[in-house]
Image: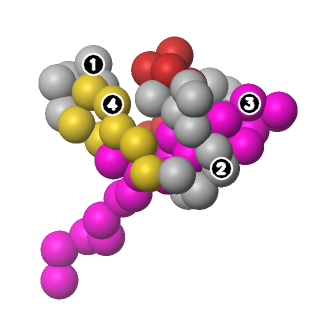
Amino acid sequence: MLRPDHKKANGKRRSPPPEAYDACEGKSAGDEAQFEDRRGETLTGSCEEDNGKLVLRPQRSGPPA
């Protein structure tokens, strides 16, 4: 699930970055993958189908308790 900050000012969802698609190249839906985002953080998640292409959906941890 995308975080609320993944929306543009007009309320539409931004497309995943190219690295999210590249991370799932050669993988199957449900496979684990990872990529480094533009801030240099490594995002890990699972590959899911999005409009006929596999894309990494990062695992997000919840807010601190």
Mark 3 = which residue? 53
Q: Indicate whether 44 appears above or below 55.
A: below
Q: Which residue is tagged 4?
A: 35
Coordinates of residue 14 in the picture (x, y in percent) = 60, 27
Which numbered disc, 3 or 2, marks the residue closer to the eye?
A: 2
Instruction: Tell me the amino acid under the disc marked 1.
Output: Arg
Neighbours of disc 3 within 10 Å: few (<14), some (14-19), many (20+): few
For the N terminus, the quadrant is bottom right
Looking at the image, tell me whether mark 3 or mark 2 is earlier in sequence order: 2
Residue at position x 52%, y 52% in the image: 31
Q: Nearer the viewer, mark 3 or mark 1?
A: 3
Report the amino acid beneath label 4: Phe
**Residue marked by disc 2:** 29
Give residue 33's position: percent from left, percent from top. 41, 43
Q: Residue at x 36, y 59 (%)?
A: 60
Mark positioned earlier in the residue sequence (4 or 3): 4
Secondary element under disc 1, as helix, strand or loop, is loop
Identify the residue at image location x=82%, y=32%.
52
Q: Position of residue 28 (x, y in %)?
A: 63, 45
State the CA–CA distance, disc 2 to disc 1: 24 Å
Q: Nearer the viewer, mark 4 or mark 2?
A: 2
Q: In x, y percent, where is residue 24?
A: 53, 33
The tag on residue 38 is 1
- The disc placed on residue 46 is none
Highlighted range, magenta: 44-65
Asked whether 13 falls inside the magenta stretch, the response is no
Secondary structure found at label 2: loop
Classify mark 4: residues with Cα within 10 Å, few (<14), some (14-19) or many (20+): some
User: Which tag, 2 or 1, sits closer to the chain's start?
Assistant: 2
Q: Nearer the viewer, mark 1 or mark 4?
A: 4
Is any part of residue 23 visible from this angle?
yes
Residue 3 appears in the picture as rendered? no
